[in-house]
Image: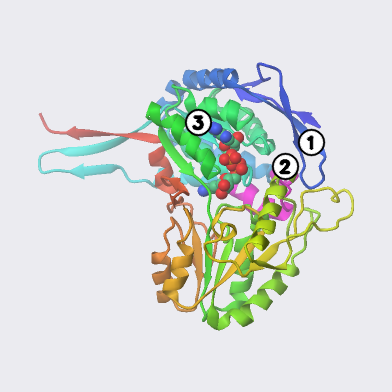
Amino acid sequence: MRRIANLIAGKWTAPQDGKYFDDHNPATGEKIAEIPSSTAADIKTAVAGAQMAQPEWGALPVEERAVWLDSIASALEARSDEIAELESRDTGKPVALARAVDAARSALNFRFFAELVRELPDELYKMKDALNVVVRKPVGVAGLITPWNLPLYLLSWKVAPAILMGNCVVCKPSRLTPLTANLLAEVVTEAGLPPGVVNIVHGSGSKCGQALVEHPAVGAISFTGGTSTGRSVAAGAAPLFKKLSLELGGKNATIVCGDADLEKTIPGAARAAFMNQGQVCLCGSRLLVERSIWDEFVPRFVAYVKAMSIGDPASCDLGALVSQEHRKKVESYVVLAQEEGGTVLCGGERPTLEPPFDSGAFLEPAVIEGLAPDSRSATEEIFGPVVTLHPFENDDEALAIANNTEYGLAGSVWTRDLERGRRIAEGIDTGMVWVNCWLHRDLRVPFGGIKNSGVGREGGRYSLEFFSEPTNICLMEA
Ligand code: NAD
């Protein structure tokens, strides 16, 4: 059991009011750490630390900052087993997933942005008699607020482009999963990054996150989390005219056409529904199946899901949900789905497991059919291992069902006919659609949602643009 500290202006710092939260491993219930319950006073000190460091950091050539990103990437790569282990203990996710996805991407995020900036052409616009040169300046201090589902993966996705563009950052990770943010704090300290460039303050959203959003010296807020929290973040940031990026919830459709290759589609749709126990914003939690293959698809899909192993995160396909509280929320949706006329084809129960996992927050993956596409369980984000099945007759009906939610984050289409796949993809009102794959990521492409799934885009040059202010200089001969 360890007690972790905030990293403020290069110093390990206890919370000013001396209060801590307990951090638990949701797979066992074991207490694994104590984390600062920081307040506005700690945020104030951290922002002051970032402000002190920013002028010198922002004045470095971007190529020098890119070298710092490479060093951080190398240090994270060297600790990838530890990252996987910590992420699994903090979130309950399988270690193998944490290694392949969380640990690998966290290091890659730093490596990727460092390389990207080296390849970016200058932004020049020639006129007959003048030349426009667009210069990118740092915003100043950026506040980075992240959720619990992909803790270091999402934090590093923001820290890397933010510091690359010359900003100093104050990070507020989820209080449920602080351990790898603390590892990042260790990495930047050991690498010798100038004090104050990366500050990490742990605490609750209401006391600590909100103070960061409302701090007048923070010029940009990059927030990833739930849609209702995003609403209050937007309300706090708007009167101060901050730059704001919001990556919010999703209720994504997986559309399976009658001609899909089921050998590939069934594992693909199951992965989209249940990866990370269904706790990925991009998860395909509504599975739309063309009526012509419904009778074949449904039993094969259910058999595939039933065969997924659940339990010890060191060896199983599915681990625990992030907390007992979150499991109760997900279970309440399984009950609601039945009240709304749904039939549970498998899962939705707590599995019986041997100690030490007998009191962990596990839930068998649930497949539910028979729900109206506009029911609450088929339109609200559950963010757990629950997928609802819906038949469709033709592409128009598939699109009507897919678009019938307040969310607009992602989706996938499965068909052998790429033209049809592309046509359906273009009709889905989301920021991202995959055809015959899911979560196949090229880090250069725009990432983000529309409707209540967010505002703005991250990824590649979109992130670099968010974390900088363009200044146009128009040069004319004297
Ligand atoms: P959450 O909104 O409860 O919390 C996210 C972060 O915001 C946490 O650090 C939290 O402490 C902080 N926070 C809470 N209240 C705040 C406030 N008033 N002011 C400032 N900060 C505050 O979300 P969560 O439960 O941690 O994560 C799950 C949600 O995140 C899901 O809805 C999921 O879809 C979404 N998500 C979206 C993406 C994306 O890229 N679109 C990625 C991952 C997760």
Task: Provide the residue designation for mark 1.
Answer: 32
Q: Is residue 329 visible?
A: yes
Q: CA distance from mark 3 to mark 2?
A: 23 Å
In what quadrant of the picture does the N terminus appear?
Answer: top right
Q: Is residue 73 visible?
A: no
Label 1 residue SS: strand
Q: Which residues are magenta?
A: 81-106
Q: Nearer the viewer, residue 186 or 417?
A: 417
Say if 320 sits above or below 165 in the image: below
Q: Amino acid at mark 2?
A: Asp
Q: CA distance from mark 3 to mark 1?
A: 27 Å
Q: Amino acid at mark 3?
A: Gly
Q: Nearer the viewer, residue 182 or 332?
A: 332
Residue 46 image label = none
Color scheme of the displayed model: rainbow
On screen, residue 263 versus residue 132, left or right, reads right
On screen, residue 118 versus residue 173, left or right, reads left
